[in-house]
Amino acid sequence: MRFFVRSAGKRDLNAISALLCAAWHDTYDGIYGPQKVAEITASWHSVPALQTRLTRPESEFIVADDGSRLGGMAFAASSDREKKLVLLHQLYVHPNCQGQGIGTALLEEILDAFPDATRLRLEVEAANAKAIAFYQAKGFVKVAETADCGPGSGMPAAVYERPLGG
């Protein structure tokens, strides 16, 4: 099936939460173990946690939809008063849908949503080779490291940026 990118809505939140749970277990069980991943997804990817993103100013919350299921999701938000730096908080593709161009389509929509931005920044787990390869292929370069990529997670991450035309 063909996926199309659209804005996320309240009716999508359960499916987005399930998608994030599947993607996180697929990606991080081998790194952090299934129990830690379950704890993180229950907190960070719960419907109430996701719902706050629907109304966040200066943000873009999108899904890839084929009419019967969601194949991916992304969320980004402007992080400075001048709207020059955008943080890509999430970009995930369901494990069964990877390799179909969904990640690229989501990233392109995020880039289009912030025409005044000059940089897009993200954090990615250093052991997530698949994601790092994806972002490097899209022009991102490593600019820093952080010891705590989530609120109190203790999970280290690499910080990548891509200059934009804004």
Image: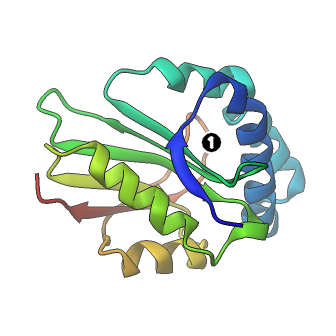
Q: Is residue 48 left or right of residue 26?
A: left
Q: Position of residue 122 (x, y in %)?
A: 40, 55
Instruction: Indicate the quadrant containing the N terminus: top left, top right, bottom left or bottom right.
Output: bottom right
Residue at position x 46%, y 68% in the image:
104
> Quarter of the image holding residue 24?
bottom right
Q: Residue at x 17, y 59 (%)?
A: 164
- Observer-nearest of 6 and 149: 6
Q: Residue furthest right?
A: 35
Left or right for 150, reference 36: left
The count of marks equals 1
- Side of 58 relative to 148 (left or right): left
The residue where tag 1 is placed is 153
Amino acid type, residue under disc 1 in the picture: Ser
In depth, the one of 57 and 4 nearer the eye is 4
Q: Where is residue 85 drawn, in percent x and y?
A: 21, 44
Residue at 67% across, 72% down: 98
As helix, strand or loop, the secondary structure at mark 1 comes to: loop
Residue displayed at 56% across by 34% down: 151
Q: Position of residue 126 (x, y in %)?
A: 53, 70
